[in-house]
Image (tube, rainbow, N blue to C red):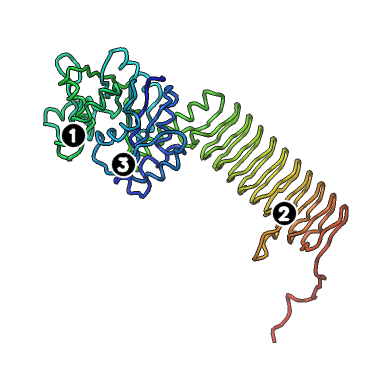
């Protein structure tokens, strides 16, 4: 749609959110609300977008910089006033303008296409997207004339008792002919209960000029939900996650219980992967084919190759190779890289470390700031002592080494290829390849200790 530009209203503070964060930056399904709106606009084929910013302008610009153009509404004086601020950017635009709100994350590209197509087909100067609600409280009402055309939109606070009984509401989505829009905007006045410039007043002005004003009714009223508080945000979150789960299931992913599984919209999952309840997949996470995830597993901004099995574990900013087993109750912290066929067992924590192919850290160990080679076995209770109170140093364990249970590896230290450390040792010096290192105090047994008498 090269002849259609989009204007997204994103200047409001959102006082009912009770937050210092601009309303449109609150996340749903892992993405700020305004990003969901932008995705819908982009998928509808609209390439030129102007975002109206105001409260938290710099935060919004930081998020969206380079993707859109901006218009500043320094003082929030209503939706009409907001759109006025875009004239400098779009005043010479000869096509149509789609106007929508940045706090409507459920809108889809399909509905936007229907609105624009209906507008063009009917030859309207303005077209309103409407919806029919059983409870229209809080929304402006669509008042139609005898011919069925839109006569005006009345905001709830300005509506008469008869107008309040109307169930067809204004969704806040419009399509206008750009030149006529800016002409009408110059004629609106803030004569209403709020003292604001309403964009809806443009429609009455256009009707007086005998310009055609029409409507397209949304097929799914759920899409137009505007977010004004945290409760509504939770409703939108649930809908978005259902959509995400449905998309993955139709693509060949098994999700045992979609209502108990939380997958962000940007997550990628391969076919034949099974997701068990209680799993949370966030950010830019990528999961390969044939994996088993969960139950009760959280994975954030991580990449898992094919055939990985994870149970009751947390994985943050890590990379996991194919055919690897993790958990239960493992914790992979940022900077962790596991090669293929690795086993990370129960109550194991790995941080900023590389674990080579075929290596095992089966249970009750901490491996931090380490480079572990291939086919290494790390016994239960092993700790890499990587921090001396001033700096962190690395531990290097070469291919085929065997680390005995309850070994303390005091970095910086290197264990050579096929070397051994005896259980209970504290290793402070490098261990040569194929050597056995034992560091223990001499054992002393005291007979009859249990039956000793106190002085």
Q: Nearer the viewer, mark 2 or mark 3?
A: 3
Query: Could you say which is closer to the camera, residue 38 or residue 348?
Result: 38
Is 395 displayed left or right of 209 in the figure? right
Residue under label 3, please give it.
Answer: 12
Mark 1 element type: helix
* Residue at the right extreme, as displayed: 434
Q: Pick whichever of labels 2 and 3 is earlier in the sequence.
A: 3
Which numbered marker is on residue 156? 1
Quadrant for the C terminus in the image = bottom right
> Is 154 rendered above or below residue 371?
above
Q: Pick whichever of labels 1 and 3 is earlier in the sequence.
A: 3
* Residue at the bottom extreme, as displayed: 455
Residue 269: percent from the left, percent from the top?
57, 31
Residue under label 2, please give it.
Answer: 380
Q: Nearer the viewer, mark 1 or mark 3?
A: 3
- Within 10 Å of disc 3 (Cα), the crowding (few <14, some 14-19, many 20+) is many
Q: Pick whichever of labels 1 and 2 is earlier in the sequence.
A: 1
- Within 10 Å of disc 1 (Cα), the crowding (few <14, some 14-19, many 20+) is some
> Is 217 rendered above or below residue 137?
above
The part of the image, by quadrant, that contains residue 145 is top left
The part of the image, by quadrant, that contains residue 81 is top left
Residue 168: percent from the left, percent from the top?
22, 24
Distance between the Cα atoms at labels 1 and 2? 67 Å
């Amino acid at each position: 749609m090269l002849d259609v530009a989009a204007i997204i209203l994103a200047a409001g503070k959102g006082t009912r959110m009770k937050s210092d964060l601009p309303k449109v930056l609150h996340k749903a399904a892992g993405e700020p609300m305004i990003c969901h709106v932008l995705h819908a606009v982009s998928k509808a084929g609209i390439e030129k977008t102007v975002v109206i910013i105001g409260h938290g302008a710099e935060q919004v610009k930081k998020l969206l910089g380079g993707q859109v153009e901006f218009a500043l509404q320094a003082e929030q004086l209503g939706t009409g006033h907001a759109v006025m601020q875009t004239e400098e950017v779009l005043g010479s635009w000869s096509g149509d303008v789609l106007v929508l709100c940045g706090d409507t994350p459920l809108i889809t590209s399909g509905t936007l296409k229907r609105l624009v197509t209906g507008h063009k087909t009917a030859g309207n100067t303005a077209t309103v997207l409407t919806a029919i609600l059983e409870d229209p409280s809080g929304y402006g009402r669509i008042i139609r004339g005898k011919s069925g055309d839109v006569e005006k939109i009345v905001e709830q606070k300005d509506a008469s008792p008869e107008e309040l009984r109307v169930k067809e509401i204004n969704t806040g989505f419009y399509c206008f002919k750009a030149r006529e829009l800016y002409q009408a905007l110059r004629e609106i006045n803030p004569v209403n209960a709020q003292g604001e410039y309403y964009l809806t007043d443009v429609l009455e002005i256009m009707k007086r000029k005998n310009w055609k004003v029409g409507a397209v009714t949304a097929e799914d009223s759920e899409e137009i939900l505007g977010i004004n508080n945290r409760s509504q945000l939770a409703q939108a979150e649930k809908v978005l996650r259902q959509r995400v789960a449905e998309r993955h299931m139709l693509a060949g992913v098994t999700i045992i219980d979609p209502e108990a599984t939380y997958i962000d919209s940007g997550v990628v999952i391969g076919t034949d992967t099974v997701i068990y309840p209680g799993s949370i997949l966030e950010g830019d996470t990528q999961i390969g084919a044939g994996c088993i995830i969960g139950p009760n597993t959280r994975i954030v901004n991580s990449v898992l190759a094919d055939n990985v099995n994870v149970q009751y574990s947390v994985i943050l900013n890590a990379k996991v190779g194919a055919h690897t087993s993790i958990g239960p109750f493992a914790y992979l912290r940022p900077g962790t890289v596991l090669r293929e066929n690795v086993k990370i067992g129960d109550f194991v924590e790995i941080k900023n470390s590389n674990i080579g192919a075929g290596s095992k850290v089966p249970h009750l160990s901490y491996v931090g700031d380490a480079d572990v080679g291939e086919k290494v076995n790390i016994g239960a209770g092993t700790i890499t002592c990587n921090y001396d109170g001033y700096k962190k140093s690395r531990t290097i364990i070469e291919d085929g080494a065997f680390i005995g249970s309850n070994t303390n590896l005091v970095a910086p230290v290197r264990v050579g290829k096929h070397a051994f450390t005896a259980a209970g040792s504290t290793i402070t010096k490098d261990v040569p390849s194929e050597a056995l290192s034992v560091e223990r105090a001499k054992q002393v047994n005291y007979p009859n200790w249990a039956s000793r008498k106190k002085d």
